[in-house]
Image (cartoon, grey):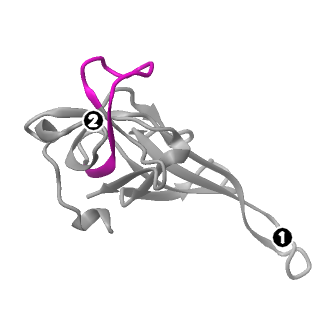
Amino acid sequence: MLILFRKRTPVGSLAVGQVAVVQGKVEPVIEMMMPGIGERCVWYDLMVESFGQGARGAGRPMWLPSRTETKFAGFVLDDGAGKVMIAAGSSEVRVSGGRKMRGPFDRSGRQRFEASLFGAGDTVRVCGVVREARKKGEQKGMLVIGPDGKKGLEIRVR
């Protein structure tokens, strides 16, 4: 079922082991800088293309992907009634929505980028499994929403 249509669970009603959908504002624990662009965020998906000789049509110049990178730093979600930590590995997170950016990646004009990101103050809806804080970097005494074994951690940025 789409995360958008699932019933929300207030942070105060979360129980360990339950699959929950929570919605609120992002409060970064650690903000990352997106490389080459300098935007502060907690998640980004970046693709850089370089202008060079391609294999098609007698080696005509074309845009070729040269680098892709996806990073996720955990954050605290505040739904107005309480806070919960959101934590997962970069490969376990599926994000839809977010701010879209594109433009030149260097001054020469031979590289360009396209990126999606979200950060502090953005409203997100998260679906995952509730557990107690136990890993390094997680705040003790706070519940954590992490990836579901099958689907990972789903995040929809509004």
Element class at badge 1: loop
Q: Which residue occupies the extreme right position in the image?
A: 58
From the image, state whether disc 2 or disc 1 is nearer to you: 2
6 or 158, nearer to the observer? 6
Query: In this rendering, would 157 be left or right of 60?
Result: left
On whether residue 118 falls in the magenta region, the answer is no
- Tell me the residue at 18%/32% (across/down): 83
Could you give the CA–CA distance between mark 2 and mark 1, rounded to whole angstroms? 53 Å
Q: Position of residue 152 (x, y in %)?
A: 46, 50
Which amino acid is tagged 2? Val
Q: Position of residue 20 (x, y in %)?
A: 26, 49
Tell me, for residue 54, which label it has, or none: 1
- Tell me the residue at 26%/50% (across/down): 124
In the picture, the quarter occupied by the C terminus is bottom left
Q: Position of residue 42 (x, y in %)?
A: 40, 38
Question: Mark 2 Cα within 10 Å, few/some/many (few <14, many 20+)?
Answer: few
Q: Position of residue 117 (x, y in %)?
A: 41, 50
The magenta segment = 124-143
What residue sits right under mark 2 in the picture?
Answer: 16
Q: Is residue 144 above or below residue 90?
A: above
Q: Are marks 2 and 1 in contact (CB under 8 Å)?
A: no
Query: In this rendering, would 58 be left or right of 79?
Result: right
114 or 157, nearer to the observer? 157
Mark earlier in primary sequence (2, 1)? 2
In the picture, the quarter occupied by the N terminus is bottom left
Query: In this rendering, would 156 be left or right of 23?
Result: right
